[in-house]
């Protein structure tokens, strides 16, 4: 007698489907090709551990290889043991190669920001060294909702409120994929439990010194209690809509910049009448784009608006000194030159 096939745990099925969908998308977009290595960024936490298990299962089905990178930030006692445990779990899942990279975290941007920067540099480095064109991260819908809510509360613009894209090519290094953005965090925990995987619980994820932890532990649950369920999903939908709109505006600005901008030995300049003829959202993007493409400097909103006043509120005012760049009104153009 043939015994019935055991039913696949719904959380395991959901994580596998999410990874399958993203890998198919990456193949269709030419981000990866048959035989390529996909690298999971593994912290050992429930999200990336569930991601590692699902990727180990799904990648070979799409003729891809799966490896992992574990970053040891060396910020907490015992971090080495945490990293080596995660790497053993990855190897046991069949991921190959598995690399542990220890990093030195710099002082910039607070411990959270500095750790993230060092982590991304290490992950990119390992992926490049192993020829992997795609790195997968375990961010979930809850992470997306927290990012959007924090952005709203800080008065951020559409770029920050767009949250994290599921698949992003980058100007240099591997593309970043986030297959689990449509799943709630409890699903990854359940997927680990069903697969017999014991995740590591990062004590920093419970430290109320971090604004993100307060949003996770207190603000979002309060909003759901007061307003009803579905708040994280609603925030994630907002991010998706903003991402579409912001991508369209970026696209138009890039196309227009080619006609509007004039390059000279001293730098780059933009036509005032053309800037005036465009709505503020495009005008500001054109200014930011010109400065970023020419000098590699990203202007804040305040700085961008200050430059835009040379266009909209011109009364003979002097040049504006920005970090590394000077903006000057010259007749019917705004010129950007390197700061002396
Ligand atoms: N030390 C690390 N090494 C490699 N990748 C990491 C590390 N820390 C985080 N990541 C990656 O970045 C993603 C988001 O990081 P975040 O700090 O939000 O996750 P976490 O809570 O530490 O762990 P997880 O998301 O795996 O449960 C992780 O899902 C993982 O893919």
Image (cartoon, rainbow, N blue to C red):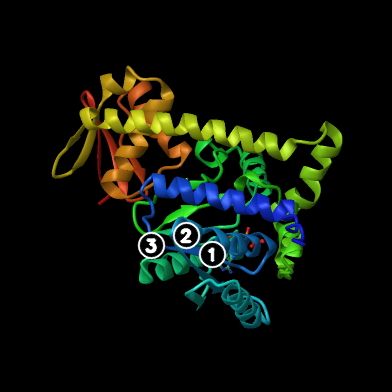
Q: State the separation of the CA atoms marked 3 and 2.
A: 15 Å
Q: Residues at badges 3 and 1 in contact (C-beta under 8 Å)?
A: no
Residue 24 location (% of width, % of height) = 47, 48
Q: Residues within 10 Å of mark 2 (few under 14, many from 20)?
A: many
Question: Do we see residue 1 in this rendering?
Answer: yes
Q: Nearer the viewer, residue 327 or 66?
A: 66
Say which quadrant the N terminus sits in: bottom right
Q: In which image quadrant can residue 269 be found?
A: top left
Q: Which mark is residue 135?
A: 2
Query: How far from the left and from the top, in percent, is residue 13?
Result: 67, 52
Mark 1 and ligand 1: say if the CB distance to the nearest ligand atom is below 8 Å: yes
**Residue named by callout 1:** 41
Q: Secondary structure at mark 3?
A: loop
- Considering only vertical position in the picture, is 240 above or below 37? above
Q: Label 3 crowding class (10 Å Cα cut-off): few <14, some 14-19, many 20+? A: few
Mark 3 to mark 1 CA distance (whole Å)? 19 Å
- In this view, the residue in front, 64 or 71, is 64
Choose the circle earlier in sequence order: 2 or 1. Answer: 1
Picture residue at 47% right of the left edge, 37% below the top: 301
Image spot of residue 180 (x, y percent): 61, 50
- Residue 83 versus residue 325 in the image, above or below: below
Kindly report the distance in space between the C-alpha atoms of the residues bearing marks 2 and 1: 7 Å
Instruction: Look at 60% across and 57% down and name the residue there.
Output: 138
Camera-near label (3 vs 1) is: 3
Q: Are marks 2 and 1 in contact (CB under 8 Å)?
A: yes
Residue ranking furthest to the right: 225
Mark earlier in primary sequence (3, 2): 3
Q: Quadrant of residue 71?
A: bottom right
Residue carrying label 3: 35
Q: Is label 1 in a helix, a strand or a loop?
A: strand
């Amino acid at each position: 007698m043939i015994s019935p096939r055991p039913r696949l745990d719904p959380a395991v099925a959901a994580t596998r489907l999410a990874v399958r969908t993203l890998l198919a998308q990456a193949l269709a977009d030419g981000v990866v090709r048959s035989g390529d290595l996909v690298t999971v960024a593994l912290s050992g936490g429930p999200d990336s551990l569930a991601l590692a298990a699902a990727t180990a299962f799904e990648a070979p089905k799409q003729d891809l290889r799966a490896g992992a990178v574990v970053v040891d930030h060396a910020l907490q006692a015992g971090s080495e043991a945490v990293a080596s445990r995660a790497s053993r779990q990855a190897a046991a899942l069949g991921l190959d190669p598995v690399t542990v990279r220890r990093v030195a975290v710099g002082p910039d941007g607070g411990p959270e920001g500095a750790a993230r920067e060092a982590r991304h540099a290490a992950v990119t480095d390992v992926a490049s060294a192993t020829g992997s064109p795609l790195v997968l991260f375990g961010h979930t819908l809850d992470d997306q909702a927290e990012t959007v809510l924090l952005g709203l509360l800080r008065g951020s613009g559409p770029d920050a409120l767009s949250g994290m894209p599921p698949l992003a090519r980058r100007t240099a290094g591997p593309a970043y994929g986030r297959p689990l953005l449509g799943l709630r965090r409890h699903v990854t925990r359940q997927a680990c439990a069903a697969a017999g995987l014991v995740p590591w619980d990062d004590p920093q994820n419970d430290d109320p010194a971090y604004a993100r932890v307060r949003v996770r532990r207190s603000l979002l649950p309060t909003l759901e209690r007061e307003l009803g369920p579905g708040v994280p999903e609603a925030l994630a939908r907002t991010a998706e809509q903003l991402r579409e709109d912001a991508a369209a505006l970026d696209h138009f600005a890039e196309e227009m910049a080619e006609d509007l901008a004039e390059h000279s030995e001293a730098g780059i300049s933009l036509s005032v009448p053309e800037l005036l003829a465009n709505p503020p959202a495009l005008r500001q993007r054109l200014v930011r784009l010109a400065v970023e493409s020419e000098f590699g400097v990203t202007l804040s909103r305040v700085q961008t608006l200050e430059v835009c006043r040379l266009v909209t509120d011109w009364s003979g005012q002097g040049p504006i000194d920005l970090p590394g760049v000077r903006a000057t009104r010259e007749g019917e153009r705004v010129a950007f030159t390197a700061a002396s």
